[in-house]
DNA sequence: GACGACGTATAGAGACTCTATACTAATACC
DNA sequence: GGTATTAGTATAGAGTCTCTATACGTCGTC
């Protein structure tokens, strides 16, 4: 069932998107490329996963978007973090810390 | 929407169940208690999440079950790892390593 | 004998990701 | 000039997983 690469853990996509936008605004495929870059190629987010997530996160008030021109002179929608988005990134980062610590602890158990 | 404690990341429950059974066979609630123990109380797996997962994993051939008596003289179904289950634990452990490394790397990015 | 704790079970809902497909516009190519 | 390819966004549908809520039987206790 699972394709060659790892399936994304549900819940981590939001975190990665928020993180991808922390330095500068990007358009959809730019976010996708940025995530691949900062995860050393581990996560390749396909459009069918990315765009619904972006819309959901904009709905939630974490992202704001505006149409513009891409590096290749194409029409593209640029996303940036809102203040609520930065707070959400903080929250999810802490949450990830708790969870990964807990699982690391579990895997160390005898 | 999310209750006081953290929602489990989807996909991590299997790993925790497999790990909880690596040392000895346990019954359902025993597995639940074991998971809470080895994650330092971070994850409390409710019956409604646990039992469907156990059935699914037995169906997949990772667990084998047999009825017996609990510490409190109650009728209880004990689960143990099969060989395929131990292989699966190996696989999921490596997978977790890859994923947590990738996300840690992403969170360190500027 | 009633009540709570132990132990298992299922139904239903909700959320998320994946695959596949579609569409438009700009560039490259012959 | 016309055709194919790439960049970019979008959605539908399916599948999977976890959560809440509820139910049922039984052992022990008061």
Image (cartoon, coloured by chain):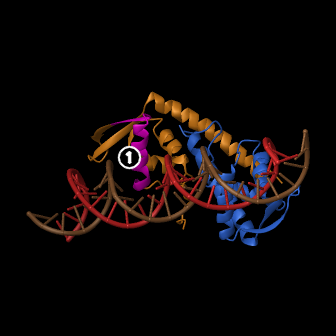
Chain colours: A orange, B blue, C red, D brown
Q: Is residue B91 left or right of residue A16?
A: right
Query: In this rendering, does residue A85 appear at all?
Result: yes
Q: Residue B42: horizontal and vertical position, in percent?
A: 71, 42
State the extent of the magenta-drawn residues as a range. Answer: A47-65
The quadrant holding residue A68 is top left
Q: Is residue B11 left or right of residue A50?
A: right
Asked which secondary structure carries label 1, the reply is helix
User: Chain letter of disc 1?
Assistant: A
Magenta: main secondary structure: helix
The quadrant holding residue B105 is top right
Closer to the camera in the image, A47 or D18: D18
Q: Is residue D2 left or right of residue C25?
A: left
Instruction: Tell me if residue A103 is in the magenta stretch.
Output: no
Q: Which residue is the site of mark 1?
A: A28
Query: In this rendering, does residue B22 appear at all?
Result: no
How many numbered discs, if any? 1
Q: Residue A41: horizontal and vertical position, in percent?
A: 52, 54
Residue at 69% in and 49% down: B45
């Amino acid at each position: 069932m699972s394709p060659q690469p790892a399936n994304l853990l549900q819940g981590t996509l939001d975190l990665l998107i928020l993180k991808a936008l922390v330095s500068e605004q990007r358009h959809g495929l730019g976010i996708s490329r940025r995530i691949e870059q900062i995860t050393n190629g581990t996560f390749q987010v396909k459009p069918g996963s990315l765009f619904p997530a972006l819309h959901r996160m904009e709905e939630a008030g974490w992202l704001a978007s505006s149409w513009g021109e891409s590096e290749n002179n194409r029409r593209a929608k640029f996303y940036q973090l809102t203040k609520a988005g930065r707070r959400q990134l903080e929250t999810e980062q802490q949450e990830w810390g708790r969870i990964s610590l807990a699982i690391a602890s579990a895997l160390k158990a005898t």
